[in-house]
Amino acid sequence: MNRRTTNILMAVAIIILTCLGREAGGQEPQQQPTAKPVNQSSQLGNTYLLEFMLSEIEGSRKVNVRSYVMRAQSGGITNKIRVQSRVPITVSTVQDPKTTQFQYVDVGMSIDCRVQELERDALLDFVADFSSVAPDQTSNLAPAIGHVVTQANAVVELGKQTVLSKMDDPGSKRTFELEVTATRLK
């Protein structure tokens, strides 16, 4: 037996003996504290309720508001929301025999967010990706798809509505405003 194989076998034996409650020397272990049940939520951190509001603003008035709510765990976990439709786009048409090929594009809202606990606040590391089909499209043309993305780290005060970003729509005179309210759940 070579040295590497011997070392692997010794490591496996130590793991097995440890699992059986014995030390490598064959003696009973010193008095161990009794195991307490592991609280899953304490490993993951606290649970938060995150309420995202995406507002479309034209001039000084809100013309559309969309709400996205998630329960999110802190502790490095990426929490996700996906609200999307698949929009068909014609990529080719053959006349004989008449066939049309489509490619599908996901259009809607995607939010990826990680929560880090602070004493009285929460740090959100987020990406919000919003896309929509322009409303004045005719069926003969390929649809124009508007797309805005914001990515940032933001400290938000718990229980208080906070503006995360404000973005002008490149295809219209509208502005998109993304807000969040974070609440720590008990």
Image: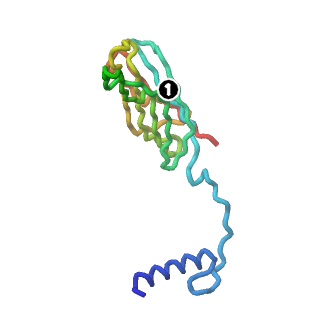
In this rendering, the answer to whether 72 lies above or below 172 is below
Q: At 31% from the left edge and 21% from the top edge, which residue is drawn?
A: 96
Give the residue type that dot 1 points to: Met
Give the labeled residue for mark 1.
53
Q: Nearer the viewer, residue 113 or 82?
A: 82
Protein image colouring:
rainbow
The quadrant of the rendering that contains the N terminus is bottom left
Would residue 168 be seen by someone viewing this image from the given angle? no
The crowd level at tag 1 (other Cα within 10 Å; few <14, some 14-19, many 20+) is many
Q: Which x, y percent locates residue 2? A: 40, 86
Residue 165 in the image: state x and y as whole percent.
40, 29
Instruction: Look at the numbered disc 1 and give the secondary structure of its residue.
Output: strand
Q: Is residue 1 visible?
A: yes
Answer above or below: position of 53 versus 137.
below
The total number of labels drawn is: 1
Observer-nearest residue: 32 or 67? 67
Could you say where residue 94 lies in the image, as x and y percent from the top left?
Answer: 31, 23
Direction from residue 181 to residue 139 in the image, left or right: left
| Lateral position of residue 21 relative to residue 55, left or right | right
Residue 128 x, y percent position in the rendering = 42, 33
For the C terminus, give its image quadrant. Answer: top right
Residue drawn at x 67%, y 63% as measured from the top left = 36
Residue occupying the point 52% across, 77% down: 12
Dividing the picture into quadrants, the one containing residue 142 is top left
Residue furthest to the front = 97
Quadrant in the picture for residue 92: top left
* Direction from residue 132 to residue 185 in the image, left or right: right
